[in-house]
Amino acid sequence: MRFTVAIDGPAAAGKGTISREVAAHFGFAHLDTGLLYRAVGLRALSGVDPLAAARALQPRDLEAGDLRSADVAQAASRVAAIPEVREALVDFQRDFARREGGAVLDGRDIGTVICPAAEAKLFVTASPQVRAERRWRELTGTGAQTTLAEVLEDVIARDRRDSGRAAAPMRAAEDAVMLDTSGMSIAQAVAAAIAAVARRLPAS
Ligand code: C5P
């Protein structure tokens, strides 16, 4: 069976956890497409041309240990605004989406640009304040030295760049199910997402 679940939304809205749990629940493969842009951003930080880095990207690059830092996140959002970089990453994502057995892809433009015909689409959001708090707790949990105000500033800057860019801006597909996780626990958000996807599965 081929079945694509597109999960989009801004940073720290809960997309990652929801996508992993949805994939595990239905036995689908999962691709965090942010890692593609982070891997290119990381190479760009060390002076490599972003387009050359995107064209040469290998699946093993997504496993690099240092993709989660705030610097790499900002670099990712800068290289993600370059149309040719996005273009170079399209085929990899579409091939993943149509693999046998079902796939969940999470990102910013999955339901709008990469997989506009995805069988299930979700747009996961939360207020900037809630997202910054979640990200700050995550970062300080790993020993990073940062303040909540700095993280909030980063979240807002990245939102602005991601939704304001001309190439595949972050936005909800018209047929996406909207999921605002601001007042939800992780378990509630995951349950709501699983229910939304289950409604789109073919009756067996
Ligand atoms: O999701 P994550 O925070 O890892 O994404 C890092 C950056 O990569 C985002 O801020 C965004 O600029 C870019 N991105 C994108 N399209 C995607 C996934 C991520 O532009 N599908």
Image (spheres, rainbow, N blue to C red):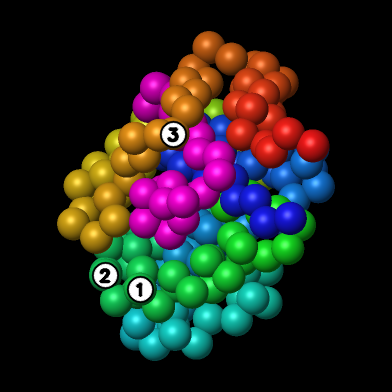
For residue 87, which numbered disc appears in the image? 1
Instruction: Pick whichever, 155 or 144, lies toward us.
Output: 155
In the rendered structure, the answer to whether residue 42 lies left or right of residue 165 reads right
| Magenta stretch contains residue 99 | no
Tell me residue 82's x, y (percent): 27, 69
Q: Is mark 1 on a helix, strand or loop?
A: helix
| Magenta stretch contains residue 115 | yes
Mark 1 vs mark 2, CA separation in Å: 6 Å
In the rendered structure, the answer to whether residue 143 lies left or right of residue 157 reads right
Tell me which corner region of the image, top left, top right, bottom left or bottom right, holds residue 113: bottom left
Instruction: Decide: is 40 above or below 160.
Output: below
Tell me residue 182's x, y (percent): 49, 17
Please say whether residue 73 is visible from this viewpoint: no
Which residue bears the numbered disc 3? 176
Instruction: Pick whichever, 107 or 13, lies toward us.
Output: 107
In the rendered image, the quadrant that contains the C terminus is: top right
Which residue bears the numbered disc 2? 83
Please say if the residues under marks 1 and 2 sit with CB atoms less than 8 Å apart. Answer: yes
Q: Is mark 3 on a helix, strand or loop?
A: loop
Instruction: Decide: is 138 above or below 109.
Output: above
Q: Which residue is drawn at 59% across and 60% down?
A: 97
Mark 3 vs mark 2, CA separation in Å: 24 Å
